[in-house]
Image (spheres, helix red, strand yellow):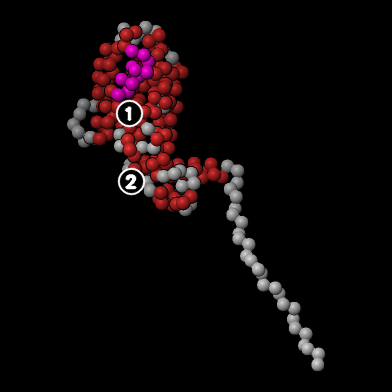
Amino acid sequence: MTPATSPTAVPAPTSVEPAARRRARRGEGDRTREAIISAAEALLTASGSEDAVSIRAVADAVGVTPPSIYRHFPDKAHLIFEVCARHFDAIDAALVQPILRAGGDPVEALAELARGYVRFGVENPEHYRIMFMGHADHTPGMYASERVLETGSFGGTAQLVQRAIDAGRLRADAGDAVLVTYVIWAALHGVVTVAVSKPNMPAPPLDAQVDAMIDTLLHGLLA
């Protein structure tokens, strides 16, 4: 008896090939990183609070998963400080560099720069607080306070101070450009810190404070 012919069987697959992970297109990672920074900046500006900028909130704003954020930043602190560092780069581009290029009297330029710096700090209190008023232990090493001398704004101010020294407008025995710049910055930082930390404290108008501070400093430094 001839056995009935059975239909041809389809062999079962021995293994399942995993779906290939889509490789990021050229430049896609950079665009995602920029989108993350922009989203964090928007959240920080809108809320006025570092606490409102969570990794999940940033991820939701960008349209990615929270783990995706960590491919670009090791933690929230690095992300926040990157946002603030770029903010300070912006003041260098918008205020310091134009003053440097304009030339003119270096002492008057220093006064103009001082007013702009204080105005920037008061108008961006959370960015300023994070960069210059936070606890040192919570600051990523690459943004540590001792690196303030490497920032563009500080370097530009030191150039103006050096011009003033070279022109004989400042006392030769007042110290080198870095020392004088640091003293000026520390004084202005005090004005900004009080304004940011105690916004409701009765005080003279901010412009008057800055003018008095500059007048006091320059009278001590002028040749």
Q: Evaluate if marks 2 and 1 touch, with contact meaning CB atoms under 8 Å apart.
A: no
Q: Determine if the magenta segment contains residue 108.
A: no
Q: Which residue is mark 2?
A: 51
Type of residue at label 1? Answer: Arg
Quadrant into which the N terminus falls: bottom right
For the magenta stretch, what is the residue range? 175-186
Among numbered discs 2 and 1, the one appearing first in the sequence: 2
Q: Spot the residue most to the right.
A: 2
Q: Quadrant of the C terminus?
A: top left
Question: Which residue is drawn at the image coordinates 64% and 66% (left, top)?
Answer: 15
Determine which quarter of the picture holds residue 148.
top left
Q: Circle 1: is it few (<14), some (14-19), or many (20+) Cα within 10 Å?
A: some
Residue 32: give x, y in percent of width and height. Answer: 51, 45
Residue at the (24%, 31%) spot, across then down: 194
Residue extending farthest left:
202
User: Considering depth in this image, is 3 or 211 the residue closer to the camera?
Assistant: 3
Q: Which mark is residue 67?
A: none
Name the residue tied to disc 1.
Answer: 119
Q: From what the image shows, is residue 16 above or below residue 4?
A: above
Labels 2, 1: front one: 2
Is residue 11 visible from the viewing direction of this image? yes
Task: Give the vertical position of 125 relative to 74 (above or below).
Answer: above
Q: Nearer the viewer, residue 61 or 129?
A: 129
